[in-house]
Image: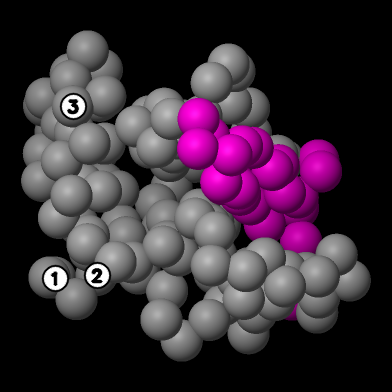
Amino acid sequence: MTVDKLEDIDSAAVEFLQKMGNCRHFAFYGPMGVGKTTFIKALCKALGVPGIVTSPTFALVNEYKNSNNEKVCHFDFYRINNPREVFDFGCEEYFASGCYCFVEWPEKAEIALPDDICKVSIKELENGKREIRVKSEE
C-alpha cells in the first residue's frame, strides 16, 4: 500500500486494518522520521480511540481505550538498551491480553515479540510518498 500524502493517512489506516484481518499485534520497522508514529496514531483513530494519541518514547507503552472500551497499546522501544528491559514492564501480558498492540522500534527487543506479530515496514519513496508493506509481502 502506498500513502500519497498525509491527508490520505486516515483512509489508509482503515484499509490497512481491513486487509490485516485478525492480526492484532504489529511491529513497525523503518528509519527515524518515516512516519511510524503518525501511522499508528491513524490506526488508533480508525479503531475508535478518542482524543490525542502520543508516542510513548519515555514511558515505553501508552494504553488507550477505544469507543468499545477495548484496550489499544502503543509501544516504543527506541530507548531500550537491553532487550530484557521490556519484560520488566510486563510486555508479554499486553500481548497475551488480546488487545491491539502497535510496536515501534521492535528490532530493539525482538526476543519479546510474540510469534504471531505482523511485521510491517514503512519506507519513504523518492517522491515523498510512503510505502507500507507487510514483511511477508516483500
C-beta proximity under 8 Å, tags 2 and 1: yes
- Residue 33 occupies quadrant: top left
Rendered position, 100 above or below 15? below
- Alpha carbon distance from label 1 to label 3: 23 Å
* Whether residue 125 can be seen here: no
Residue at position x 41%, y 81% in the image = 116
Residue at position x 56%, y 46% in the image = 70
| Residue highlighted by disc 3 | 11
- Would you say 92 lies left or right of 114 here? right
Q: Amino acid at mark 1?
A: Glu
Residue at position x 71%, y 42% in the image = 62
Q: Amino acid at mark 2?
A: Lys
Residue 80, how many percent across, how many down?
76, 61
- Alpha carbon distance from label 2 to label 3: 21 Å
- Alpha carbon distance from label 2 to label 1: 5 Å
Which comes before the other along the chain, label 1 or label 3? Answer: 3
| Residue highlighted by disc 1 | 138
Residue at position x 15%, y 41% in the image = 15
Residue 79, how many percent across, how many down?
76, 53
Q: Of the residues tagged 1 and 3, which is closer to the observer?
A: 3
